[in-house]
Amino acid sequence: MKHRLMTHMVAYYPDGASSVKVAAAMIDGGSTYLEIQFPFSDPTSDGPAIQTACTQALENGFKVRLGFELVSSIRAISDIPIFIMCYGNTLLYSGVEAFIDRCAQQGVQGLIVPDLPFDYDEGLFRLSEKHGMSAVPVVAPTIGPQRLESILRTEPRFLYAALRKGITGKITEIGDDNIGFLRRISTAAGKKEIRILAGFGISHREQIDLLATHVHASIVGSAFVRTIIENGGKGVYAAVKHKMEELI
Amino acid sequence: MVWTQIHEPHRNEEKQVKGIYNDYFGDFGGRYVAEILRTPLDELERAWRESMDSDAYRSELQDLLVSYAGRPTPLLFAQNATRSCGGAQIFIKLEGLANTGAHKINNALGQALLAKRMGKGRIIAETGAGQHGVATAAACAKLGLKCRVYMGEIDIRRQRPNVFWMELFGAEVVPVVSGSKTLKDAINEALRDWAGSSTSTHYLIGSALGPSPYPDMVREFQSVIGREVEEEMRRLGLEVEALIACVGGGSNAIGFFAPFLGREKPRLVGVEAGGRGSGTGEHAARMGGFGTPGIVHGYKSLFLLDDDGQVGKTHSISAGLDYPGIGPQLASLGREGRIEFTRASDDESLAAVRFFASHEGLIFALESAHAGAAALEMAPEMPENRAIIVHMSGRGDKDLFILAKQLAGKGWRDFLLQEGREDEA
Ligand SMILES: Cc1ncc(COP(=O)(O)O)c(C=O)c1O
């Protein structure tokens, strides 16, 4: 059985043209959802790999406008559901509703904005719904039952479960702790139809095997950045495609 | 000298000063953090509120502020400076005389003690000029806590003496090489550390910024400065026209201004880094039309952003003032007009260091010298029966290398080269 994956890439990394190839490799490799990160100068939730990618993407001339152009070139080759991940400042600077409207026009399915939680969201959740998109709340293992309950009560279509503390990148061991956390979410969600996406530190097939029965899809991000750094010389498409085959 | 009770929470009814727990200040503030940081922030807020009501905590902090930090710090009548400027009487709040050389110790002690109460044995901090790092490292040495300080590589070079002191106090200083390699990047690294370590670690933020409750908490710890000044004003019967402080993130300014925020007088003047010009990347002035509303480091405020919403480049001769954002309460009070903002350039600040050294025998930190420069400009415009109070938030020992390079020239350079040669031999 093939796994459902949400594959993460940084727009304009390793450069503008190559990031279309990265997306194509993920799509051809069988990805279910594409998560495109719009780089920000100060990505505080990200570890060294994604930080490096963001810095390089900005040096490559990434602009929000070009990020949307990238989305539309990917749209031209595939109808894969696309999620945009970015930091709150990017929305605020464009105007929250203007940004969301732009996403909706490009056929983006959802937004993941880690520093806009539901109770400090600048209208993200309401406006996403208004424009027919899903804002994806992020939960972490430290979350208390009441707060988890408040998030689930909003009945999000997707929920992003960060599998451990810390930032992106470092390998996560899948064990009782994070499986217990995923069970806790499922139990709390009850009959609500919430698709759980789980990520942070997923880079090997074995981890995805262990997660598969507990989640709707596993998220893989930093691992692709590392793949590009290590093997990108031979061509990013081949490198990313190869990694996809290994994971799926 | 009289001296005021510390941590008598000032409950002021007026608009900006709703009390000590605000979260938002007008449009600014908030707690815009990834979920993983939410639990520690909620916990911190609870623990802080509880400690503010605890007599044991308050008296322990008070003892430390007196016997360890050296409070109260003096208010000096700068007679020679006044005579030379002509005009308003210039007074200087000598906060730089506090142990470790700046106002930062007030906040470091308050938070370190709080961390201890919370059972957190490890402290992390960011630092720009290194003064907050030194204060934190000292507080940790004193209270028996482990300490790690994140500091941008560029700041390490600019403020090398403070790195030495931090390490001597037993702290680990971690160079930050990402982004602009200055204060903002050190905050990023500290936030990343905390996301993984919060169970055992307290993040001791050094300025009145970051997600709530930090802006409220840091202001309260620093407001001891303002209360001492208020007491002295009353004792000396001063007709104070203006209080003047430099503004990096804003902790020394908000602490100095705190008791006066809900009143109409005196004028409150915040001085930002004018750097070497008003072009992009040449300064760090966020007020006066340069800053744009943004969300960075967990709070909403005015930030220096580029034309695509990325955090912009800044410049200042002083490592403590080149931060691209400003504490949310200051931004809000600036918008409302309660606080006026002005700028002092690198050169004006250097000239102010020189002026106060030769006229008053004081070495202003380069940060504080920005306030000094503004005072020198304002005093001559005012009548002699009025007073202005400048906040010398820190002293300039840490700036020896920058100052000597700028002011002593070749002699200093020869000395360094000779020292280097002798060291090698
Ligand atoms: C002496 C001194 N004054 C002022 C500042 C600026 O910080 P804030 O605006 O938080 O007082 C610093 C920061 O390092 C400092 O060392």
Image (cartoon, helix red, strand yellow):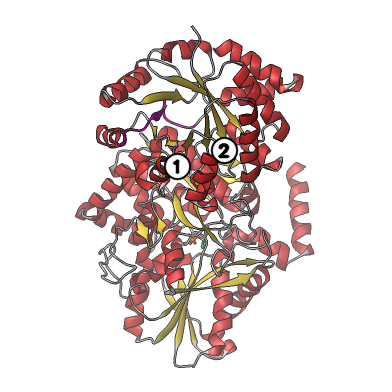
Q: Quadrant of residue B119?
A: top left
Residue A160, magenta (yes or no): yes
Element at badge 2?
Answer: loop
Q: Quadrant of residue A41?
A: top right
What is the magenta segment's predominant secondary structure? loop
Chain bearing tag 2 is A
Q: Nearer the viewer, residue B242 or B413?
A: B242
Residue B21: percent from the left, percent from the top? 29, 57
Which residues are the magenta region? A154-167
Q: Nearer the viewer, residue A187 or A31?
A: A31
On the rendered structure, is B396 left or right of B120? right
Split into 4 quadrants, where in the image is the N terminus of chain B? Answer: bottom left
Residue B72, magenta (yes or no): no
Q: Residues within 10 Å of mark 2 (few under 14, many from 20)?
A: some
Check chain identity for marks 1 and 2: say if they share one.
Answer: yes
Task: Name the residue beneath numbered marker 1.
Answer: A131
Mark 1 or mark 2, earlier in chain: 2
CB-based contact (under 8 Å), mark 1 and mark 2: no
- Amino acid carrying mark 2 in the image: Gln
On the rendered structure, is B56 left or right of A177? left
Residue farthest top in this picture: A1
Residue B282: percent from the left, percent from the top? 68, 62
Split into 4 quadrants, where in the image is the C terminus of chain B? Answer: top right
- Amino acid carrying mark 1 in the image: His
The mark found on residue A106 in the picture is: 2
Residue drawn where x is 71% and y is 68% of the image: B407
Residue B81: percent from the left, percent from the top? 56, 83
Query: Is residue A11 visible to the viewer in this orientation of the structure?
Result: no
